[in-house]
Image (cartoon, helix red, strand yellow):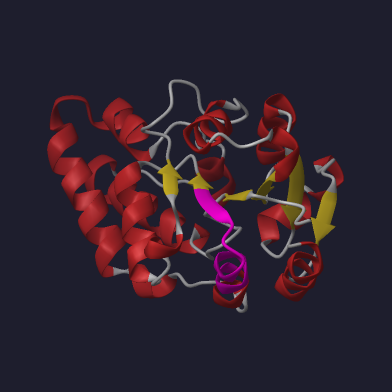
Amino acid sequence: MQKFDGIIFDVDGTLTSTLDLIFDTFRYILKKYFNKSMSDDEIANLFGPTEDVILKEWAGDNYETVRKDYYDYYTKNHHMAGLYPGILEVLAIIKSNNILLSIYTGKGREAAAITLKKLGIYDYFDMMITGDDVKEHKPSAEGINKFIEKFNLKKDKVLMIGDSPVDVSAARAAGVKAASVVWDEYAKRAKGKLKADYLFHEVVELKNFLTENL
């Protein structure tokens, strides 16, 4: 009997090395429109609300112009991002076992779609839940619950995989298993706060775990 019927992935820092692109895009907007600068950590501290919420707060009446420029820059410079080596194989293993796949990310729907399509993994997912699709962002369990309800899954057959303490908290709130991955620098720094059921330091460890448990 397979251990999981549904697996949910976070995006940034879990599937994709996109943080440098995100930081660069926000810095571009800050410099061009506000003549300001922020460190990586300062930008990371903004995360939770979607890009659109952050930009709207910054730009006010100029929001539509700033928003278009943000996504144009994010798209044109997407060569800065990539999949972590081995992730494509992990997704292929999951799908070959007919297990449902979902995204649950704090990114907005537009940014998430750009990244997943640019990196060639958009079609692996049966559902995509972004910050635009929930009333409460992580650590709320809302995005996990939407996936469970849509496909009528048993909670003990669902696994949430992410790189942040909020992913673990969301999994706990939903009553599903939590796996933390620490192959991104920010995740390594938060390692002590990750109280997940499973911890993976390299993609190959996750691949081996799934191969044995699917």
- State the residue at coordinates (77%, 53%): 3
Is residue 28 or residue 5 the one in the foreground?
A: 5
Residue at the image point whose x is 72% and y is 31% from the top: 169
Q: Name the quadrant containing residue 53.
A: top left
In this rendered view, identify the residue nearer to me: 78 or 146: 146
Q: Name which residue lies at 73% across and 29% down.
A: 175
Residue located farthest toward the front when viewing the structure as drawn: 1
Of 30 and 15, nearer the camera is 15
Comparing 35 with 179, the one in front is 179
| Span colored in magenta | 91-102
> Outermost residue, top direction?
135
Q: Quadrant of residue 124?
A: bottom left
In x, y percent, where is residue 49? 45, 31
Residue 69: image location, x then y, percent: 19, 51
Q: Is residue 85 above or below residue 28?
A: below
> Compared with residue 144, is residue 191 higher up or lower down, i.e. above or below?
below
Image quadrant in which the N terminus is located: bottom right
Left or right: 191 as drawn, with respect to 181: right
Residue 39 visible in the snapshot? no
Q: Is residue 60 magenta?
A: no
Left or right: where does residue 175 sit relative to residue 21? Answer: right
Q: Position of residue 96 (x, y in %)?
A: 57, 71
Camera sees residue 146: yes
Q: Residue at x 54, y 75 (%)?
A: 88
Question: Which x, y percent locates residue 195?
Answer: 85, 40
Q: Quadrant of residue 207?
A: bottom right
Q: Please give the count of numbered marks on the rendered protein.
A: 0
Classify the position of the C terminus by image quarter: bottom right
Q: Is residue 68 left or right of residue 34?
A: left
The stretch drawn in magenta includes residue 98:
yes
Q: Is residue 170 above or below residue 20?
A: above
